[in-house]
Image (cartoon, grey):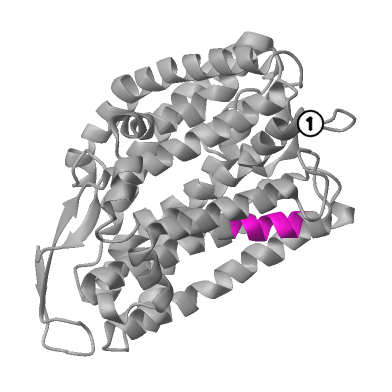
Amino acid sequence: MAITTSNSSEAVSSTRSTRRRFFPELEGMRGLAAMGVLFTHVAFSSGMVGFMDQEPNGFLGVMLQQLHVSLPIFFVLSGMLLYRPFALATIAGTPKPEIKPYFWRRALRTLPAYWVLVAVALLTLNRDGVHSLWQIIRPVLLLQVYQLEARLVGQGLEQTWTLATEVAFYAVLPLLAWALNRFARSASDPGVRVRRILWGLSPLVVIGFVYAWYTFLPSMGVYPIQNEWPPKWLGFIAVGMGLAALSAGAEVAPDRVPAFYRFVQNNPLWCWGLAAGVYVVACVRPIGEPGYADYPSMAGGMTEHFLYTLFGLLLVAPVTVPTPSRFVVAVMSNPVMRFLGRISYGLYLWHIAIIYFWRGDLMPRGSFLELIAVTLGGSIVLATASYYLVEAPAMRLRERLGKASAGPSVETIVR
């Protein structure tokens, strides 16, 4: 499709055509994140990490506990992938995404497979605890994260608080994109537009840190439910949106994007090396005890929040460039990573339930090797079934309801 305009302040070029293109390395990155989350939860449930009076199981326990750094990868990827077509429209003057198809695509990708998990979890793991219709409706609508008592009938659904945050982001993204477009489009230079978007996103990062500070107040207690609410994770999503603007800007005018992103394009291994360094620092835990999954103090929690934000930025940035390096493509788009990425949503959805089915609870005990074998094997089987029996058929409805291809893709400019 194409757009034509005679107003130079409204478009970088008089005509821009776009197409949707598949980037397998983005799918591989999602698979990596899903595996990190799975290993973290198995490490906790097998007693590998420290918790309360239980000490971590050596250096491996410390490393496994800090695989929590996988969490921001999901949010950063979502911010990047979903905002990129909006960013491209602002920076390059391409057609703006249509809102109704956007919501259809999000609903079809997210809800059917999730609802299958909810049905299974409520009928098996939580059957004796369900005493009202609201206890069923609440998880169906992803509202369980906002009420503390929801945890009483939330076995097998504990990790889905992150999905509630994602869905909240889906709902507000068009409004955020509209505001950023109004702020950035008055400039005619694509580099200035990119910078204005980045400046417009900076308050979201600040909100995330301020809300994180709020959740670590001693008066909030340990593991407050407010810790799982969307504002705390808004900064990770804003980082992904910033990468979307940089990626779109690099496609339109490579020499006009900020120096940081040009460094990412030319030195992806340096970025991943720095990300590994951030992970090591998080493992060492400058403030707090290494290897413990206990709720952190104010200083420790804020330090980790900063490190996780930096890790997500450095790890994801190299796969967002318009033409990733051969090494990045080889690492992230090999058959194993692509398969894990394809079934990553199912891995995320089912791994906690499998621990319950095998063990009955999540309390730390037992053998790590046994539990990882059962959980990983079972998750791959159920995730593969979920993809081919639920997710793929639902995504095929995109062509009819969402007016888009069934497969994952990123909007790019036709050269």
- Horizontal side of residue 306 vs 365, given as left or right: left
> Residue at left 49%, top 35%?
34
Find residue 358 and report its image quarter.
Answer: top right
- Choose between 397 and 367: the one closer to the eye: 367
Residue 186: % across, % down: 32, 88
- Choose between 390 and 412: the one closer to the eye: 412
Range of magenta residues: 301-309
Residue 41: % across, % down: 64, 29
Based on the picture, tell me whether residue 129 belongs to the magenta stretch.
no
Find residue 340 and report its image quarter.
Answer: top left
- Choose between 223 and 396: the one closer to the eye: 223
- Horizontal side of residue 215 vs 260, given as left or right: right
- Horizontal side of residue 12 vs 279, given as left or right: left
Q: Is residue 190 above or below residue 327?
A: below
Based on the picture, tell me whether residue 306 belongs to the magenta stretch.
yes
Residue 262: % across, % down: 35, 72
> Residue at left 59%, top 24%?
352
| Helix, strand or loop under label 1 | loop
> Residue at left 70%, top 28%?
44
Q: From where the camera sits, is residue 154 visible?
A: no
Q: What amino acid type is highlighted by mark number 1?
A: Pro
Q: Is residue 407 above or below residue 18?
A: above
Specify the quadrant that holds the N terminus: bottom left
Q: Is residue 165 above or below residue 346?
A: below
- Choose between 152 and 67: the one closer to the eye: 67
> Residue at left 41%, top 34%?
111
User: Where is mark 1, residue-wise?
Assistant: 56
Residue 311: % across, % down: 56, 55
Q: Total label count?
A: 1
Q: From where the camera sits, is residue 366 visible?
A: yes
Q: Is residue 397 above or below residue 133?
A: below
